[in-house]
Amino acid sequence: MFWKIIATGFGSGYSPVAPGTAGALVACILLWALTVVFPQQFSGAWLLPHLLVLIAVFFFLGVKSASVLEKEWGHDPSKIVVDEMVGVWIAMLGVPFSLVNLALAFVLFRVFDIWKPFGIRKMEHLGGGWGVMMDDVLAGVYSGVMLHAWLMLRSSL
């Protein structure tokens, strides 16, 4: 049961419509909630180290849960969305927290996750939970790069 809770992003992966989007939305809500409940730990200079811990914990839990559930659900079923959660959080690394930046990270991540350009699709060929997680890690990295570029461009105008 624990692995299903993690893999499905606290149940969001059971959404009958766009479970990946539902999982990414849960990631956004969870990050926002953490900034509200723990404002000193999840703001300013403290956001980065705490976000890195959150990403690392859920990344390794995601690898394990996807590997465990692969026997029951097959490889990379749509209800496994912990990878989307991690991807959104990666897109927010080093980005000043705001709801606008979080929304931009969400949209950019979903575009890269669905489109899967620049080697993202190749990550899916890794075995077990690693393949499930790594394509969304790379989508999160690309999204973060784009978000940082946008923020730098906007600040220079």
Image (tube, grey):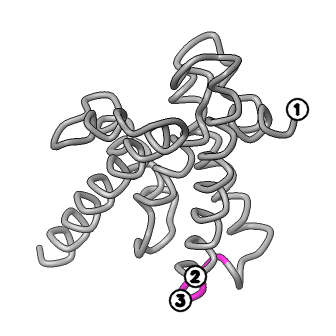
- If the image is split into quadrants, where does the C terminus sit? bottom left
- Rendering quarter of residue 151: bottom left
Drawn side of residue 46 relative to residue 135, left or right: right
| Quadrant assignment for the N terminus | top right
Which numbered mark, 1 or 2, is in the foreground of this view? 1
Q: Residues within 10 Å of mark 1 (few under 14, many from 20)?
A: few
Which of 114/35 is in front? 114
- Residue count near mark 2 (Cα–Cα under 10 Å), binned few <14, some 14–19, many ≥20: some
Please report the bounds of the magenta region as a residue range.
42-46
Query: Pointer 3: what residue?
Result: 45
Tell me the CA gap for discs 3 and 2. Answer: 8 Å
Q: Residue at x 72, y 65 (%)?
A: 34
Q: Position of residue 128 (x, y in %)?
A: 52, 36
Q: Nearer the viewer, mark 3 or mark 1?
A: 1
> What residue did someone put label 2 on?
49
Compared with 142, 74 (above or below) is above
Residue 147 percent coordinates (x, y): 28, 60
